[in-house]
Amino acid sequence: MRYNAYHETFETYTVPLLIMSEHRISKRWSLQDLLPEPVEASLEAALAELETRVTSLESERSSLSDDVTEGRFFEILHEYEAVVDLLNRLGAYGMLWFSEDTQNRAALNMRDRIRAALTEAGNRILFFSLWLKEMPDETAERLIAGSGEFRYFLEVERKFKPHTLSEKEEQIINLKDSNGIEAMMGLYEMITSNFTYTLEVDGETKCLTRDQMSSYYQHPSPDIRAATYQELYRVYADNSTLLAKYTTTASVTGEM
């Protein structure tokens, strides 16, 4: 349930949607459960819901005190959970559609649009997770004691207390990550997913994408497994100048 401006939540969704293998039937995942068609209308409705929920949660800020009752605390916690669930759903849609085809300009624009909205929303609700970390131990023990299924989440949040900065500083980091390291990672995906590979399988020469190549990483034949990795590294070596420039730029700008 923890939201951290794409670092821990949304990047886990960068999984190829198009699965191609000699041993599996090709199929395309549906994103209808995340944002049903028409997508633009669904996105606008979801963003409007997000704004309403975030505004409602913000209004509870004054209720977060050391003497907050267990009942009131869990009402606010459930509100926070609903916001994070919506953040994750929208973020998952943006990342999954982009991962399907990193050369799709519409998917890239949608992902960036969602990312900007979620970063803003995440910064607005950041006060709640910071309060969870900063509350006195006595208050934390009282609230965690009756937290049920939320116990693990609350205990983990508390462990980040020594590594947490002020709200303004954390917000700046989130904005920097969204426009910095996350943008660089997206650029890397766009570059490397456009590489093509040549692999001979059972006497047939195949021209494959990186995702298609991955189906041969665990092929029963050790020769094919070896050839797969050799071809993978050959293509990366052929593009070493481009990748070195990318790495240098990311390092110099402090995004690695």
Image: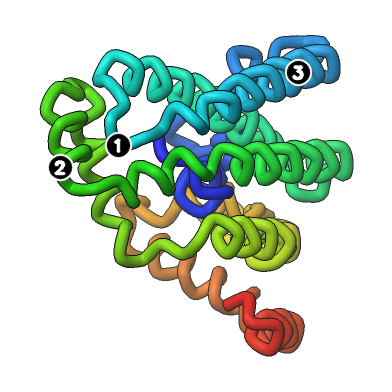
Residue 75 as seen in the image, left or right of residue 146: right
Q: Which residue is mark 2?
A: 138
Q: Measured from the top left, where is residue 4 in percent x and y?
A: 50, 48
- Describe the element under mark 3 as helix, strand or loop: helix
Q: Looking at the picture, tell me which residue is in the foreground, 230 or 187.
A: 187
Q: Earlier in the sequence, mark 2 or mark 1?
A: 1
Is residue 49 something one can see in this rendering?
Answer: yes
Residue 212 lies, with reference to residue 237, above or below; the image says above
Mark 1 packing: few (<14 Cα in 10 Å), some, or many (20+)?
A: few
Residue 249 as seen in the image, left or right of residue 103: left
Residue 72 lies in quadrant: top left
Q: Amino acid at mark 3?
A: Ala
Q: Which residue is mark 1?
A: 66
Q: Amino acid at mark 2?
A: Glu
Circles 2 and 1: CB atoms closer than 8 Å: yes
Residue 186 as seen in the image, left or right of residue 164: right
